[in-house]
Image: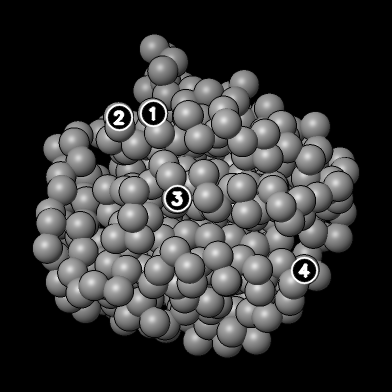
Amino acid sequence: MRLCIYATNMQADIEAFALYAAAQPGVDALLVVDSEAAIRSQALCDFSPLPARLAILERGDPALKKKLRAFGADVIAIDNYIPDFDVAPRALVLWHGYGWRIDDLAQMRKQLKRRFGDPTRSNPNLLWASFGPIDHEYRTTHSRLHPDNVAALGSPYSDLLLPSSAFQRAFTRSAAARHYAVDVAGRKTALFALTWHHGSAFGRFGDDEPLFDRLFDALERRSCNAIMRMHDRHRFAKELLAALERVAKRHPNVQLKFKNECPDAVVDLSVSDVMVSNYSSILNHFYFLGRPTIHLDPAGEGGDYTYCVWKRGKVRVKRGADAGEVWKIPPNEIGGLGAASFDALVAGLERALDEPDCCRELASSFVARHYTSPDGATCARALEAMRRRWTLS
């Protein structure tokens, strides 16, 4: 099998699948990314080196199309982006995260149809890997994908995150410490993974900058780091970016990162004792570790939302959106603690630091409801599903 992995960001499920597939006998794998140097410098490679047989091309290579034609891929694995030229006759879609918010696949459906045939009809050229039965139902109803084209395979990323995984057994915080400006080996760490979808970080909790100051002062009193792992830098308002930079400079226990500059998250997840997020799908990944999570409701104790979407290359902001316009999964369907106020957030952090097992059962229950067989063999299941569907050796 000749497999091209065309990753918008080398992270999460497509990353885990790429690492696994490229190491398997009979798979000739080629990875397309923005920067080979950036991929090779990520902390992940200290614990799970890129397979020697994995060839890498960069999107900016002027000879990219020619090299891809010469490679002659049987299948292209994609996340949320489809190249605007033909790479392979078949596609495996590993969508970039299983989150709570409604996503509109109208543009994705058009792109799939143009390259691989109509995804709303039974299509032998397409396999969409859903995360579990609930996601399968959503993709076949709301997203209008034909059931024949969707398989509930689970999360390949779970193969790296389950405590019993080879990756987690080999991982140590001391070995990862060189990649951080804060002391992840000697202190506890809180991971703040905040999405851009609600305009501000704290929503109706209050003004972002003074709340961050109060929060990071409270964490310092507990000898706790904060890693601020934000979404892509260009999706945030300039005012918020400036505030984040100022806050990070004022607090030596804080490290600020952006996904477009540091795409891999598995080491950030692995060094962290608790995660805080306003419903970014990275929360789902942290559930596999069984550690505490705190879910910030952007509406606070109010009723409606500021909701941002990316359209035609810009962030579009809608104010006063109701819950039905935002959520595909109810915001109270979570695998951890909820917080609708700043005081509740602080209390949740205190509990998480004092009771590291406080969310273990909640996380396990969510995973059991929403994911197919997180058993350490999801990557193998996805590869086998491809081989069966397309009779590829």
For the C terminus, give its image quadrant: bottom right
Q: Which mark is residue 211?
A: 3
Label 2, residues with CA under 10 Å away: few <14, some 14-19, many ≥20? few
Q: Element at badge 2? A: helix
Residue displayed at 80% across by 32% down: 178
Q: Residue 238 carries which label?
A: 2
The part of the image, by quadrant, that contains residue 69 is top left
Residue placed under numbered mark 1 in the picture: 242
Residue 292: percent from the left, percent from the top? 64, 71
Among all residues in the image, which is located at the extreme top? 62
How many angstroms separate mark 4 from mark 1 (CA)?
37 Å
Residue placed under numbered mark 4 in the picture: 163
Q: Which of marks 4 and 1 is nearer the N terminus?
A: 4
Q: Element at badge 4? A: loop
Whether residue 140 appears in this view of the structure is: yes
How many angstroms separate mark 2 from mark 3 (CA)?
18 Å
Residue 50: percent from the left, percent from the top? 71, 37
| Amino acid type at mark 2 | Lys
Are the two marked residues, 2 and 1, in contact with CB atoms closer than 8 angstroms?
Answer: yes
Residue displayed at 71% across by 67% down: 353
The part of the image, by quadrant, that contains residue 109 is bottom left
